[in-house]
Image: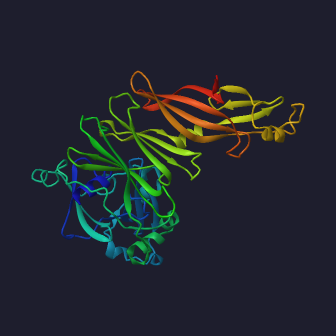
Amino acid sequence: MRCYFKNVLNGFIPEDYGVNALTKLANKANFILVDIDKDDMPEIIMSLETEDGKKHWAIIDRKNYKWNMNYTGEQTDADEVDWDELLKPITVSKEWLADEAKRQGITLDDLITEDNVEGLAIVEDREYPIIIQKLVAGLNELFSRTNCNNIDTTKDYTYTSFTDADIKSGNGLRAMFGNGPANTIVNQQILADLGNVIGDGNIDKISLMGKKPLAEVNNFYTDMTLWIQDQTNNEVVQVMLPTSTGFNPTLQLIDVTGRSVYDVVVTVQDDASGQIITATIFSFANNNPQIIFDSNSFNDSFTGVVTFLPHYKVEVVMSTGLRFVIDITNSVPGLLNSIYHRNGQLKDQRRGSITGLTQIKFVKNGRGFNLVTYQDVLAGVNPLDVIGTIVSTFMYSERTNTMMLTSQVIDINGIQTR
């Protein structure tokens, strides 16, 4: 279990600290490690005490590889939790606790100055005492950073189910300590591939894990996460997906950045129709996980205004500043009749819309692969009334470490207009 705890707490534990399992706690725990919100990424629960003697509970969770203390609340009898019996309070200032910015991207050093920190991890309804300890002479072998046992990512797990509202209200805390419902839907491997994604020349195993809550619904998964296993030392890194629920997920290894190292591409359909997808491209080069494309950000940035003009013309003005005027004379007659009079004049003012991401493709360039994205131009809001497609091409930029737009055209029945 040591490697599991080490990987779970990655980013929270300083580089000069190690983690190991104990047979029992010598002192009261400083923190509890448990998956409260069933997202396959455990949270850290602590008890904090300010200089005025008031005690607060706090939940620290990881997002985008940083640990943030987003949930806090004053301890009361209504919690139905004996905090003094459960956790050793950590002293913080009222000013620090009130400053939301200081509670973002925190590490163990921000909260505790001791060299030995004990905690209680709850995994599969079992309790594991653990210790986080500063590495000094004689302890390096105990906390070896590379000699980890293999973590079986296909193993079934049982998680306790809570909503985001439960966490904010503290109901999840009460349930976690004996009053909560059990969700026995198990984690399973959905897809897997092998390739060098870290960049050390060795083959890594990349797995997309998730839960299938409805047996009668094909290819629908929840709580999806990405697992990267370094096959040289069997260390595993678990990565949260921006969107973890959907249909027909895909997993691809493609050298988008041109570094001669595979990047990891995950797509998920938003609903059973498959008309809108979520796509994320991860880079793990040099053991530095980064998101270089995220369709949620893409959808926010690449929008446009669609305006119908007389005589079966449509103006599309994109957020990039590009303007297209397209001819829809050959569109479905029923659609045209609902918009235009016989003389080609508009029956009334009408706007169309541009969808989010519907499809991605990759086209080989000199170094790696360009990303090509597709968005439908709709006559209204009906996803079946497609009058064109926005095709955008992106190339990876080493300088910005992002995908940069290189071209954007509109496609009408296979004919592209710039």
Where, quadrant-wise, is the C terminus in this rendering? top right
Which residue is painted at 33% across and 63% down in the image? 156
Which residue is painted at 64% across and 28% down in the image? 410
Q: Is residue 97 left or right of residue 285?
A: right
In front of the other: 115 or 40:
40
Q: Is residue 347 left or right of residue 70?
A: right
Horizontal and vertical percent position of residue 344: 86, 31
The answer to whether residue 67 is visible is no
Q: Residue furthest left?
A: 138
Where, quadrant-wise, is the N terminus in this rendering? bottom left
In this rendering, the count of numbered labels is: 0
In front of the other: 257 or 121:
257
Horizontal and vertical percent position of residue 283: 38, 38
In front of the other: 355 or 123:
355
Q: In the picture shown, does residue 103 fall above or below 317?
A: below
Q: In the picture shown, does residue 22 fall above or below 95?
A: below
Q: In the picture shown, does residue 395 fall above or below 42?
A: above
- Asked which quadrant contains residue 37, the reply is bottom left
Horizontal and vertical percent position of residue 239: 38, 49
Q: In the picture shown, does residue 277 fall above or below 22?
A: above
- In this picture the colour scheme is rainbow
Horizontal and vertical percent position of residue 103: 42, 53
